[in-house]
Image (cartoon, rainbow, N blue to C red):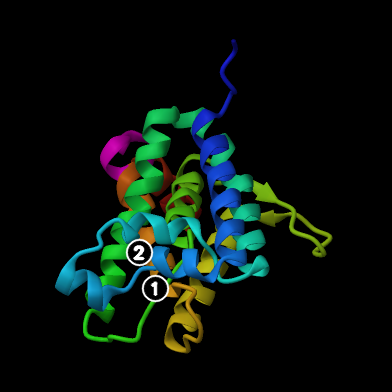
């Protein structure tokens, strides 16, 4: 039996779709999986740092995250290997969740969900490895440079975190992006330095 070319990304994609759909159709299931910083700090529930990353606020939220993940995760896994890719993904998920807990630990009504922290870690790590990557997002007729997409996504996340409504964890976007960059800097410093050199020569 031949293993799929991208077992890590394929498994995460499939799990995210299945678990998110369950959450979208089962309010009871969704409420058990969301991250509540106030509760976690005081009485545990650390599993929600992970479970909250597999559920989404709606179909639009889910689809946008899946498109972003699909565009960047598969080439990144081929470049760095399955083990490092999976570690990166869950590192981004957990660290961004911890950052959210630190910020909202005294808000008993705050609850959040979404895979965006992990996906931003993948996105920004991908930019280090593939700075010239371009992607198509309908209905935009032109290819979007990966670095431009990453910066625009982060700017939108910052704005949204300042005007947050609903349960989408925009704060996790920023934490995930920083996690992705730091992960590459620690695990592949040569690649990270190459990006810095490239940026310095283009300025």
Q: Quadrant of residue 95?
A: bottom left
Picture coordinates of residue 141, whole percent (x, y): 84, 60
Q: Which residue is mark 2?
A: 175
Location of residue 31 with respect to 14 vertically, above or below: below
Magenta-drawn segment: 185-192
Which residue does the image show at 27% across and 86% down from the upper left?
107
Where in the figure is residue 156, as x and y percent of width and height? 54, 76
- Alpha carbon of mark 1 to alpha carbon of mark 2: how far? 7 Å
Left or right of residue 72: residue 86: left
Q: Position of residue 79 (x, y in %)?
A: 49, 30
Q: Does residue 27 appear anywhere in the picture?
A: yes
Q: CB under 8 Å between callouts 1 and 2?
A: yes
Residue located farthest toward the top when viewing the structure as drawn: 1
Mark 1 closeness class: few <14, some 14–19, many ≥20 residues within 10 Å: many
**In this view of the protein, can residue 76 be seen by the observer?**
no
Residue at 29% over, 36% down: 187
* Picture coordinates of residue 124, whole percent (x, y): 46, 53
The quarter of the picture where the N terminus appears is top right
Q: Is residue 165 above or below residue 42?
A: below
């Amino acid at each position: 039996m031949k293993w799929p070319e991208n077992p890590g990304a394929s498994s995460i994609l499939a799990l995210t779709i299945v678990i998110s759909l369950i959450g979208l159709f089962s309010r009871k299931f969704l409420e058990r999986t969301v991250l509540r910083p106030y509760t976690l700090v005081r009485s545990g529930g650390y599993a929600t740092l992970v479970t909250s990353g597999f559920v989404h606020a709606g179909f639009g939220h889910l689809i946008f995250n899946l498109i972003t993940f699909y565009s960047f995760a598969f080439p990144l896994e081929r470049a760095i290997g399955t083990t490092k890719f999976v570690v990166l993904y869950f590192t981004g998920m957990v660290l961004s969740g911890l950052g959210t807990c630190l910020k909202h630990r005294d808000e008993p009504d705050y609850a959040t969900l979404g895979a965006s922290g992990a996906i931003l870690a993948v996105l920004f790590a991908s930019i280090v490895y593939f700075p010239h990557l371009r992607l198509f997002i309908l209905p935009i007729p032109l290819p979007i440079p990966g670095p431009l997409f990453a910066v625009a996504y982060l700017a939108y996340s910052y704005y949204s975190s300042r005007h947050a409504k609903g349960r989408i964890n925009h704060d996790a976007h920023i934490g995930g992006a920083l996690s992705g960059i730091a992960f590459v800097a620690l695990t592949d410093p040569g690649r990270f330095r190459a990006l810095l050199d490239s940026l310095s020569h283009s300025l």
